[in-house]
Image (cartoon, helix red, strand yellow):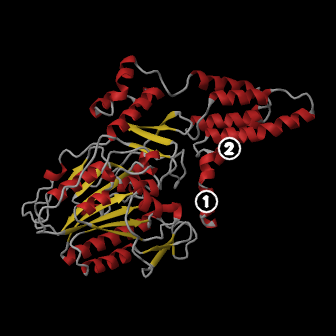
Amino acid sequence: MGLWSAYFIAKLLLYAGGYIGFNPWLNLVFAIFTALPPQNPRQRFTKNLIAVPLGIMLLYHDSWLPPFARVLEQTNNLAAFTPAYLWELLLRFVNWKLLLGAVVLGFIYALARRKLRLSTFVFIAILVVLLRPDYPMPLEPALATTAANQTARPEAQATIDPRNLRGEALEGMLKDFYDKERLRQVRFSPLIGDDAPYDIVILHVCSLAWDDLNFVGDDGDPLLQRFDIVFDEFNSAASYSGPAAIRLLRGNCGQSTHRQLYDTANSDCLVIDGLQRVGFAPKWLMNHNGKFGDFFTDVHTHGAFPGEPEPTANAKVVQHAFDGTPIYDDYGVLSSWWAKRLADPTPRVVLYYNSISLHDGNRVGAEKNSASYGGRMTKFSSDIRQFMDDVEASGRRAILLFVPEHGAAVRGDRRQIPGLREIPTRAITHVPVGVRLINTASVAAKVRQRIETPSSFLALNELLSRLIADNPFPKSDLQLGSYTQNLPRTESVSENEGTTVLYISGQSLVRMPTGEWTPWEVPTRQAAIR
């Protein structure tokens, strides 16, 4: 086996540390091939000529990187990245701790190979992985009978260690989840009277999750303190902007699969269409051009948002995105629009505003690398709070919905570098969603409500439906609890193209594009907004 034993030892150590996966059958076959003794230099050369590309492909297969076909699909998007951002991403793959470990391992290997037949230890280690895998473990018969029904009875999940479930049981749970979601729907009731007209402002924010705030030590951010209702366990279900926008704009129906997002939508699922029917004129605003990833098409076509975004060309450019395009000042864009809104006689408006100020790779001023996430979050928080102050000072009533698309993956983990969101883990899809009622008649009676049950867009739109059906603004004794009781519960299921994540009993389980299920460590949220 020669130097190939070092290849397998390194992979086995990375696997033991949780940095890569390890397919024991493929690695065993490859190990047997590399152990075949060549009879002459020509055979040795030919064997290595075949083995080197196979070894690289097998290492890529065992890594947590996206399937190569998926990378090819994203070629156009990758080509749009600036050279500086591509270099920055490349450097994130460099793990100095692992490089130091590789140097130490190389030194130990050079000494050990003189005394030991290391290929023997390689085969023993592969067989140990093959015969005693960590996952999946046998499923108890009683558990197998009920596993497919657990999403319907969340309280029963506390009795399950999801790591003990076979792939078939997890597939059954996933199917059961989507079967039930297809039956759920929210409808907006027609408005009764117009004694207290108000607007609805939806702030759809790219790259903001609880884990990001926790990592930068900012999960006590003053912006989050301003909301009357906070969803503590909201799942955005996606980790890319386009699918996240479609899910929000189709949020009147239960959660669909990723693939169904690009099918023709049922009109009853369309949020903006439903709001138009009850008297809200739609407006669309962004602080970017919407071209990257064809975001405009996702909103306009798949999300069925009518019309075009309003122009922002006169706003101040405060950042440049990872593709070099301008990003406009959030407060400047919103305050300019609000000034026009106050002069508009339309009685009720719903605004969809999309911001990418927190996206990975954004540069401020002449900075060559990504600007500090914490610094951008401070600026963004200040901008949104200032806009909220302007709305309040104007005296006009508004329901403000603050909904992050997904997280920024600022922390990263051992399997995905910071900024990589191909696998929609809980650290990325567990986002802080807030609702603020601005200029209600009653202020003192508003007691902050926290929604601590697992929820998603159906719960948010059910809340909005209740607020529309029973206008809260003229109430002198407004009690928010009457609007937030028994909102629809949605278990945490997230998807990207080919990848699915279930979150069960505090444990994330990921179905990779190969169809295999694997556990995934979940970062602990160390603090909460109270």
Q: Position of residue 263 (x, y in %)?
A: 44, 49
Residue 375's place in the image compared with 514, above or below, is below
Residue 259 in view in this figure: yes
Identify whether 305 is placed above or below 1.
Answer: below
Residue marked by disc 2: 102
Left or right: 429 as drawn, with respect to 434: right
Between circles 1 and 2, the one closer to the viewer is 1
Rounded to the nearest angstrom, the CA distance separating label 1 from label 2 is 35 Å
Quarter holding the C terminus is: bottom left
The amino acid type found where label 1 is placed reads Asn
Identify the mark at residue 76; answer none if there is no mark: 1
For the N terminus, the quadrant is: top right
Question: Which residue shows up at 52% across the image and 68% down it?
Answer: 321
Mark 2 secondary-structure assignment: helix
Q: Residue 529 versus residue 197: which sits nearer the camera?
A: 197
Q: Nearer the viewer, residue 419 or 72?
A: 72
Structural crowding at the residue carrying mark 2, measured as other residues with C-alpha within 10 Å and reported as few (<14), some (14–19) or many (≥20): few
Q: Position of residue 477 (x, y in %)?
A: 7, 60
Q: How packed is label 1: few (under 14 Cα within 10 Å), some, or many (20 or more)?
A: few
